[in-house]
Image (tube, grey):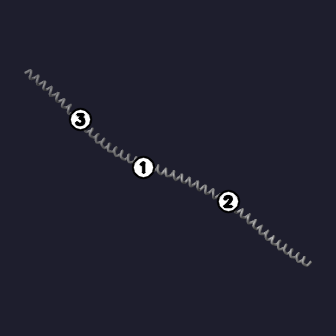
Amino acid sequence: MNALRIESDEANSKVEELQAKNKVLEQENLAKEQEITSLQHKNGLLEAEVEKLEAGIKEAKAAADEGSQHGTHNETLQRRLQLLEEEAEEADKNLRETNDKLRLTDVKAGHFERKVQALENDRDQWEAKYEEMAKKYATVQKELEDFQAEISSI
């Protein structure tokens, strides 16, 4: 009976020991479950942040592509601007040359106008002299005819 009591006490102490161990394990299990829940929550937050960052990367890539397109468009516009500047310089050069030619033509026109004016004045003088000489010739002719008529009558 003593042996049974000892065995019963040992069994009770073993049960208590196992119950204590079970309690410790349950607490550890509860702590592990809380840790799992916490880690799952953290994982969910991290996944959300990963999605957010991936969306940001997509936006950044889209912006980079758009920037690249803008860069290409900018280069095209730069080339067009350069061509237009070259055309403007050529047009300016042609305009200067045309203005120089126009000035030269105006100078020549003024010179020729003065020459024409001088020639017209000379012509007017020669016409006046011609008319004067024509009158003198007519007068001399008449005098000659009168003189011939007088000589003929003598």
Q: Residues within 10 Å of mark 2 (few under 14, many from 20)?
A: few
Q: Which residue is mark 1?
A: 86
> Residue drawn 40% across and 47% down?
90
Q: Which residue is mark 2?
A: 47
Amino acid beneath label 2 = Glu
Q: Nearer the viewer, mark 2 or mark 1?
A: 2
Q: Give, as a three-letter code, the residue at label 3.
A: Arg
Q: Earlier in the sequence, mark 3 or mark 1?
A: 1
Residue 141 horizontal side relative to residue 32, left or right: left
| Upstream in sequence: badge 2 or badge 1 | 2
Residue 32 appears at what percent x and percent y? 75, 67
Residue at (28, 42) in percent of width and height = 111
Residue 67 on image: x %, y %: 55, 54
Q: Is residue 110 above or below residue 10?
A: above
Q: Give the answer, above or below, for where 102 lies relative to 43.
A: above
Marks 2 and 1, how far apart at CA: 57 Å
Which residue is at 91% across, 79% downward?
2
Q: Disc 3 versus disc 1: distance between alpha carbons?
A: 54 Å
Using the image, tell me which numbered label, if any, was put on residue 2: none
Q: Amino acid at mark 1?
A: Glu
Tell me the SS state at disc 3.
helix
Quadrant that contains the C terminus: top left
For discs 3 and 1, the disc positioned in front in the rendered view? 1
Q: Is residue 124 left or right of residue 20?
A: left
* Residue drawn at x 77%, y 67% as measured from the top left: 29
Q: Residues within 10 Å of mark 3 (few under 14, many from 20)?
A: few
Q: Depth check: give the residue in front, 111 or 43.
A: 43
Proximity of marks 3 and 2: CB atoms separated by less than 8 Å? no
Mark 3, residue position:
123
